[in-house]
Amino acid sequence: MSACVPTRAADSTRPKRIHQSHSPPPTPPRRFRIAGADLSASIAVFLIALPLSLGIALATGAPLQAGLVAAAVGGLVAGRLGGSPLQVSGPAAGLTVVTAELIHLYGWRTTCAITVLAGITQMGLAQMRVARTALAVSPAIVHGMLAGIGVTIAVAQLHIVLGGIPQSSVLDNIRALPDQLANVHPAAVSMSALTLALLLAWPRIPGRVGKLLRRIPAALIAVAGATVTASLAGLTLPKVDLPSWSSHALAGLPEGPVLGVAASVLTVTLVCSVQSLLGAVAVDKLVAGRPELRARVGRSDLDRELLGQGAANIVSGALGGLPVAGVAVRSSANVQAGAVSRNSTMLHGVFVVVAALLMVPILELIPLASLAALVMAVGIQMVSLHHIRTVTRHREVLVYAVTTIGVVFLGVLEGVVLGVAVGIAVAMHRLARTRITYEEREGTHYVHVRGQLTFLAVPRLSRALHQVPHGADAFVELDSSFMDHAAYEALQDWQNSHTAQGGTVELTGRTGSRITEPTGSAHCRCRPWTPWRNHHCEPSASPRSAPPGSRPGGPGESAEPEDSTDPTGPSGASGRSGHQLARGISAFQRNTAPLVRGELARLAREGQRPAQLFLTCADSRLVTSMITSSGPGDLFVVRNVGNLVPLPGEESGDDSVAAAIEYAVDVLKVRSITVCGHSGCGAMQALMNAEPGGAMTPLKRWLRHGLPSLERMAAKDRPWARLAGRAPADAVEQLCLTNVVQQLEHLRAYESVARALREGALELHGMYFHVGEAQAYLLTDREGAELFDHVGAAEDLRYPA
């Protein structure tokens, strides 16, 4: 391929320099290294996970080793295979009620088998790529489910805190509470109170000393303090009992009614999946709030996360562990501790294994009352006042309350199903509840619509509209966020009929802003991005009435004859272009300038402060403001033929691109640089078709900066870039994609860019716009492959360092 492109030797005027390879040398195999931040974060997570895992196992009635097994498997298996690098998985408090009920109904070995089947189901769902469907569940239902589980946990553990034994249901626990209060165990209550006091006070220690002490997890301090106190005081209390691992019970064949086991598998799958996927989204938000992590940690792949959770549940159930899910407390601690990769999650699993094997004598000193108090505090925290305020503000408190009550008194699956049913009923009520009023004031007729305008409201809407007399002035105010096709048709039919009979109609929103312009040729109703040739502001210039090959003019322009012989006259090509430009400017002054004048005046006073340098091709089909939804002052745009970034010192007298990069990074302090290529790029086509030798035209001299992209594409040791998982359509598209990657490499050679990258003040992005599909793709790095993925589907939207 290199034989058909212009070479550097053709430019004899350039001084000879030592040849530098355009492609970077092959990277040596990376050695496995653990960052110091990952090591310290894994220790912090381990110290939180150890007491919580034992406490959750105690709350479920499972063997205490089952909590340690689930914590270790969650760290090692889910941490390695999952799609959320910083999410920590293990036995979750949200699964406590479900697991306790399964153990009560079917026994421990069958519960382990149900966990295995749930893991297989999760892996099947991951292969079907339905992970994002779980995010469609209303947050009110999810928060209600967690609140109901939290209430159930807190009521059950209260009996252990008081020195008793919990019952099998919430109602039984509530009924037994008076007798339990009459027969409290002083030693258990004192250790529980000490645990809760340390748990609450430790994070609130003031001053510089408190800042240092707060690095030790409060859960560890609370349990350790109660354990040391109970041992020194010689209190007689039930304590952790870890039988020999040789007698540890593993999974067996499921026993019980088929429908009951199937429903149990569905319940475990639902709770584990929803909690893990919502947790992954929450971890992404935590990472996004920490600039030092955004550049190193990619976004979660939810389908892969579901796959990892399924594999962890299979292994955990087979080894006799509790069900595994993503855990919010441990994940948050992992991010806050500064973890930068999945090594932290996996190391915490290794530490749990070591503790389970070597720290048994120490673990058996922990009072059960202390673990119960810890888990009870976790249950109380699951009833979040912030969530209650949020669902109240969004008028979904009924869904939240019904789900919570259903989970508490009926069970997790039943409560969730009840919450979904109430949520659907509330949504249907909102859709059907539409208020339509009609009134006449001073000869003008007003129709007000409040609520969602659906087909259910069409009869009432028609009755109100037909009260407006023929030929009258009418205002229709739509105070709604949704209008379906049936309502739109009814409104448009009435509007057309009313205006045909001499009346006037104006549609407005709730603030009185006009929705539609009056019909007439004097007003241009084309979209702001409508090309000049597609403007149809006058009937004579409409594309429908123009002959094939004609180019109607801009707003208010009449069609000109196509057979004009004067190319510079008013009816020639140049004349039409001039008229189009003038009328486009006129339309801007008339329609757009009044809307943006205030913002532009502010920018004129304050100066430009763009967030991005956007380097793209000069192709006329790329409208940067449209494809990025940006406005004045957002982008510092540099356009050239082929979106090329010459290496420093190679522009041969034309330093325009280098100057723009330096100005954007050092003066404007942009936070990111995006190189955007596009489909059907004429520059890439010319680069591939260029003949060697011949006159060195300005275009050839410029395109020589694209030669490294050709070399990169031809290299045998480099995989070709892919577009949303598929191979490029042809060699030109492959070169367009490769060129984006190569120009990002060139950017790194600039001193100002390299310095900003080292300081973490700058990010580089690769982008590809497919003109025919009107689809934008962002460059990601997935397992070492250069992949352009749909926006919103990419794991990592930054070019890897």
Image (cartoon, helix red, strand yellow):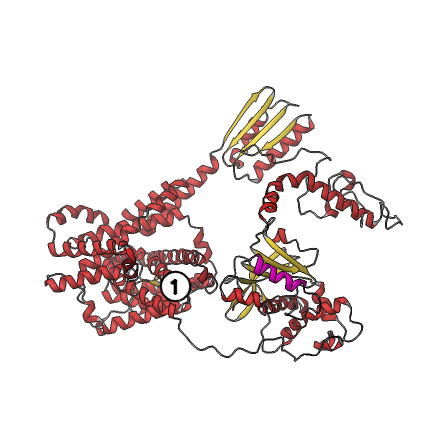
**In this orientation, does residue 757 appear?**
yes
The three-letter code of the residue at mark 1 reads Gly
Q: Is residue 639 above or below residue 688?
A: above
Queried whether the magenta region covers residue 395, the answer comes back as no
Which quadrant of the view contains residue 674?
Answer: bottom right
Q: Which quadrant would residue 18 be assigned to in this image?
A: bottom right
Q: Which residues are magenta?
A: 655-668
| Position of residue 223 measured from the top left corner of the image (x, y, whole percent) | 21, 61
The N terminus appears in which quarter of the rendering?
Answer: bottom right
Residue 664 on the magenta segment: yes
Q: Is residue 673 above or below residue 480?
A: below
Residue 252 seen from this side: no
The residue shown at (10%, 50%) is 183
Q: Is residue 553 left or right of residue 395?
A: right
Magenta stretch, main secondary structure class = helix
* Residue 500 at x, y percent in the picture: 69, 28
Q: Is residue 419 above or below residue 66?
A: above
Residue 749 figure quarter: bottom right
Nearer-the-camera pick, 379 or 315: 379
- Between 213 and 308, the residue placed more toward the observer is 213
Q: Is residue 558 left or right of residue 148?
A: right
Q: Along the horizontal axis of the image, is 296 left or right of 570?
A: left
Q: Which residue is mark 1?
A: 338
What element does badge 1 sit on? loop
In the rendered structure, the answer to whether residue 75 lies left or right of residue 556 reads left
Horizontal and vertical percent position of residue 69: 29, 68
